Amino acid sequence: MRILHTMLRVTNLNRSLSFYTEVLGMSLLRKQEYPEGKFTLAFLGYGSESDNAVLELTYNWGVDSYDMGSAYGHIAIEVEDVYQATDQIRRLGGKVLRDAGPMNAGTTVISFIEDPDGYPIELIGAR
């Protein structure tokens, strides 16, 4: 068994694709429209779906808002240098929720950013 993907519902697919490809450097692996169901799926990642867990963005046509809920946490992405990655994301127009620094009660360097739909993303230093 293995994890295949994590799915997020988005309100503007083009805006989200731009964020994940241009700001976070993911590749668009595949995209499929489902006219009968009135939704589009886009799969993104840092490598092939056969070798890596990826992110699925689901755009339900005509839906422009979602409730986040209180159970959802965040996506985590490993980066070489959290300070540099956070600064670069800020320069590219990304929203930084927590600047880079040691985590609470620990030494691991992290930061938090937010995608266009408000989903938090944790950047964690390479181990």
Image (spheres, grey):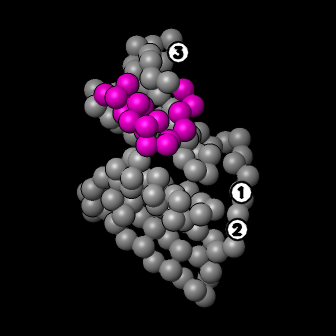
Q: Secondary structure at mark 2?
A: loop
Q: Which residue is mark 2?
A: 63
5 versus 114 height, above or below = below
Residue linked to disc 3? 104
Q: Earlier in the sequence, mark 1 or mark 3?
A: 1
| Residue farthest toward the bottom in the current orientation of the protein | 36
Specify the amino acid type for callout 3. Answer: Asn
Rendered location of residue 59, percent (x, y): 58, 68
> Amino acid under label 2?
Val
Give the image location of residue 102, x and y in percent.
Answer: 44, 16
Q: Residues within 10 Å of mark 2 (few under 14, many from 20)?
A: few
> CB atoms at circles 1 and 3 under 8 Å apart?
no
- Distance from disc 2 to disc 3, alpha carbons, whole Å, reads 37 Å
Is 90 in front, or is 74? Answer: 90
Disc 3: CA contacts within 10 A as few (<14), some (14-19) or many (>=20): few
Disc number for residue 66: 1
Mark 3 falls on what kind of element?
Answer: loop
Along the viewing direction, whichever of 115 and 32 lies nearer the viewer = 115
Q: Is residue 26 visible?
A: yes
Can you see residue 2? no
Residue 104 position within the rendered picture, expressed as x and y whole percent measured from the top left: 52, 15
Q: Residue at x 58, y 50 (%)?
A: 116
Q: Which residues are magenta?
A: 81-98
